Amino acid sequence: MEDNVLMQGTVLLAEPFMMDPNFKRTAVLLTEHAKGGSVGFIMNRPMEMSIDELLEDFPECPSRVFWGGPVQTNTVHYVHNVGPLLDGCVKVSDGVFWGGDYKKLKFLIASRLILPDNIRFFIGYSGWGDGQLEEEIRVGSWIAAGMDANYLFRSAPEDLWQQIMSDKGDTYGVLAQLPEHLSWN
């Protein structure tokens, strides 16, 4: 795999037979990829709570919370599509931004200028040390794919892994059809 394929905004799809329960059939949005390591968020693990149920001082917002990964599960992160409206955010890919001013976020949500369809909240994140992700890709643990903002903000999370795998076409479309439990075929 070429080094330039792995970059901020890449989607990492767990290979179909990955057994690690943290990442089985996950689609991870890579929000940072640099020499020191990588950070991403699992886009297809919704939790049974909304952000205003999770955080006491948060304005009413029925946006579901997602499990972002096994690292620092006592932290909350957010990815949105409102861009520079939220000062200090980082552009991840077209129509996808990470973070930004937290106080302004709460104000924009309370003012209904950011709606649940504009933002995804994550508990924890997925992280890799320097060179770790490249090695995991080299041994076949992950399949890199392009990001489309619709994956995060419009697609059904339970279908996301299969959808992105199918969107890659060719052999990947066949892999997307494999049942999660081989004994079911």
Image (cartoon, grey):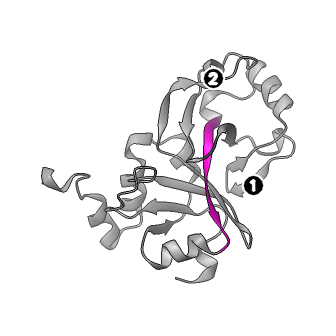
Q: Circle 2 is placed at which residue position?
A: 54
Q: What's the residue at 49%, 74% (across, down)?
A: 137
Tell me the element at label 1.
strand
**Labelled pair 1, 2 in contact (Cβ < 8 Å):** no
Q: What's the residue at 85%, 37% (across, down)?
A: 101
Earlier residue among tags 1 and 2: 2
Tell me the element at label 2.
helix
Q: Residues within 10 Å of mark 2 (few under 14, many from 20)?
A: few
Q: Residues within 10 Å of mark 1 (few under 14, many from 20)?
A: some
Q: Nearer the viewer, residue 31 or 149?
A: 31
The circle on residue 40 is none
Quarter holding residue 55: top right
Q: Is residue 119 above or below residue 32?
A: above
Residue 49 in percent (x, y) is at: 53, 24
Could you tell me how many numbered marks the image carries? 2
Q: What's the residue at 44%, 41% (across, down)?
A: 157
Which quarter of the rendering shows the C terminus? bottom left
Q: Amino acid at mark 2?
A: Leu
Left or right position of 147 against 181: right
Chain part drawn in magenta: 119-130
Left or right position of 169 against 123: left
Q: Is residue 10 above or below residue 43?
A: below
Q: Circle 1 is placed at which residue position?
A: 91
Q: Is residue 124 above or below residue 168?
A: above
Left or right position of 104 against 17: right
Mark 1–mark 2 Cα distance, whole angstroms, equals 26 Å
